[in-house]
Amino acid sequence: MMRKTMERNLHRGHSAALAALLDLGTAGQRGFAGETLTRPLRFGFVGVGDRGSAHLDVLLHMDSVEVPALCDINDAYLYRAKRWVTEAGKPEPKLYGKNDTDWMRMLERDDLDVIVCATGWKWHAPVCEAAMLAGKHATTEVPAGLTEDECWGLVDTSEKTGKHCMMLEQANYSPDLLQILNMARAGLFGEMLHCAGGYVHDLRLVKFDPEREPWRLQYSIGHNCNLYPTHAIGPIAWLLDINRGDQFDHLVSMSSKARCLNDFARLYYGKESPYATMAMKQGDVNVSMIRTKRDRTVTLHFDTNTPHPHTAEFRVQGTKGHYAENLESVYFDERSPKPHTWEPLKNYAAQYQHEMYKSIDPARFNEEGRGHGSDLITSMLWQRFLRAVRAGVEPDPDVYDAAAWSAIISLSARSVAAGGKPVDFPDFTRGKWRTREPLRLG
């Protein structure tokens, strides 16, 4: 019944689908929110391509995880993932991949606890909402939603069902950024004033690769905004206690002209290529600024079209100190050894490295031939999530974070379209940010 309702309403638009789904009810399927769990967690995957396979590989190396179901419309990805599951010594999974919505059939199973969504962006919010309504916790690659309605839908559904919805923003678990968070909590930066970050990464080859991410180019053709804010805003939101003592208030956003994708198409595919003259809506450089309720500021850069190596764009500024990621350095008034001279961040690692990394032997990860792309940071993300679900508590990034971080896409689009006018942020916490405690990653 649920699957038929979803199929019917997806053709009428996502908001209509949500309205219908919320009326289905999930009493008796609320699962583990607030409860402890001792048996293995059972995962279903929707999408096992590039990012999905990375998450699958990490989880398959964890004894407390089972993977009863896999879904992908690409048979090569699907059967590769099946082989990985059985090679890991786990029971053979059931496969789903008849069409774009076969994941709905997978959600009808009663032996899944958590859904991992690693599809193209347009499916992230629909899959997560449906997963929660089917009694499963939802996790998704970034972004969690593309519109404000989708973000509100995730919040409403999570609150209604008692199911978690976590965005898989692994940038939050970088060793350096967790060390910076520890240093900020210890007061080294003084009062927080400003953070800056961005996604400044030349993706022209990826956008024109029909095999790797065929959907990505379409967003540059049809959108003009900050299309990829979460890698930067995730760590920034934790540093500024967003949704936990402070809140995004409003945003302004501006984009440059769009030239680089057409130039790239002419260079690599010839002037006769349709992409050489096709109108690209996405400006080559987007800059967005956010002000918070407590008068802190954030600058976000988005640039995936211009020619450049990957660029570190993260900066933290407070009344007593400054961190510059591109220099891997910090400076603190009355603490740094030389006035007006940067010192290496590593000078503070012994004292402020996060506990979760202190007992880790890096040689355990990324060993040649170990697996299919597992990495330390992704492993940390999943370990934290598993611990939270087993303990019956919220994961570190929760549904309010998923909504607030993702909403920057649609809000920046509105501001760009209005000539850079301010756009107010929704309060996805409905005022709870005023009394929620800052996040502690103990």
Image: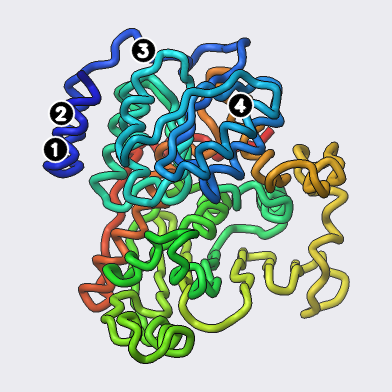
| Marks 2 and 1 close (CB-CB < 8 Å) | yes
What x and y, as percent, mark residue 342? 79, 75
| Residue 29 numbered tag | 3
How far apart are the alpha carbons under marks 2 and 1?
6 Å
| Tag 2: amino acid | Ala
| Tag 3: amino acid | Gln
Crowding near the residue tagged with mark 3, few <14, some 14–19, many ≥20 C-alpha atoms within 10 Å: some
| Residue 153 numbered tag | none
Residue 38 relative to residue 44: left or right: right
Q: Secondary structure at mark 3?
A: loop
Tell me what residue is drawn at x 34 percent, y 53 percent: 407
**Res 114 seen here:** no
| Tag 4: amino acid | Leu
- Say if 215 sits above or below 166 in the image: below
**Res 305 seen here:** yes
Q: Secondary structure at mark 2?
A: helix
| Tag 1: amino acid | Ala
Mark toward the start of the polypeptide (3 vs 1): 1
What x and y, as percent, mark residue 303? 47, 74
Mark toward the start of the polypeptide (4 vs 3): 3
Residue picked out by circle 1 = 16
Q: Which residue occupies the foreground of this view, 224 or 408?
A: 224
Which residue of the protein is positioned furthest toward the top in this rendering? 28
Residue picked out by circle 4 = 386
